[in-house]
Image (cartoon, rainbow, N blue to C red):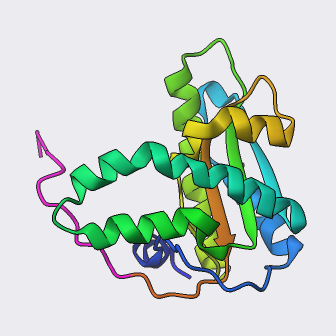
Amino acid sequence: MDLYEAIKGRRSVRKFKSDPPPKKTIEKILEMATWAPSGMNLQNWYFVVIAGDRKDALVEITSKGYDHIEPVLKDVFADNPMVVEFTRKFFKRLGGAPVLVFAYYEPTKERPETSIQTVAAAIENLLLAAHAEGLGACWTTGPVHVAREINEALGIRDKTLVAVIPIGYPDQSSPVPKRKPNRVMYEGF
């Protein structure tokens, strides 16, 4: 798969088949995530990958993040309440994904924004690698609102949750979203 094809072909998948991907494939995807650039090359990302029975308990906790984002969703999608309802259903089970990746950063002497950007770059690599492997994924930040409960369940201390990424074989074809115009300005060309 060509890089440009991968970038333009990747979609956020929010409905998954129940069959779990092979652990080797997940390991490969996470390895690609760690090849991302990082602020000061600190590579201070940290990933927790959960599958199996333990995942269900974590889905129950992460689903509570929906309550925090619902008011914003209702405002942003006031003219399209179906998006709000679809998102509510997605959060209830995280689309039935067989694998969840919890993406964290470990604090450094650098500003938190740098660490967030570092993890964001790793997440983009993860999403592209998942797509290249025939898997779907979705970058979710709603669960960050219940990070304390998630961290408690995972036994995580001294790390900051940036996102939760459900991964699995897609059970949907996501539409191609339109690109917004006028988002790049050029000078001196």
Judging depth in this view, the residue of 95 and 71 nearest the camera is: 71
Q: Point out residue 147 in the picture as x, y percentages from the top left corner.
A: 65, 36
Image coordinates for residue 135, horizontal then vertical, percent: 64, 79
Tell me the quarter of the picture where residue 100 sits. bottom right
Viewed as shown, does residue 188 lie left or right of 104? left
Of residue 189 and residue 48, the one placed in the foreground of this image is 48
Residue 77 image position (x, y, % from top left):
23, 60
Bounds of the magenta segment: 175-189
Residue 43 belongs to the span the image colors magenta? no
The answer, for residue 60, to whether it is visible in the render is yes
Tally of numbered tags: 0
In which quadrant will I find the N terminus? Answer: bottom right
Q: Position of residue 2 (x, y in %)?
A: 51, 79
Residue 141 appearing in the image: no
Which of the 4 quarters of the picture holds residue 156?
top right
- Judge whether 113 appears above or below 76 on screen: above
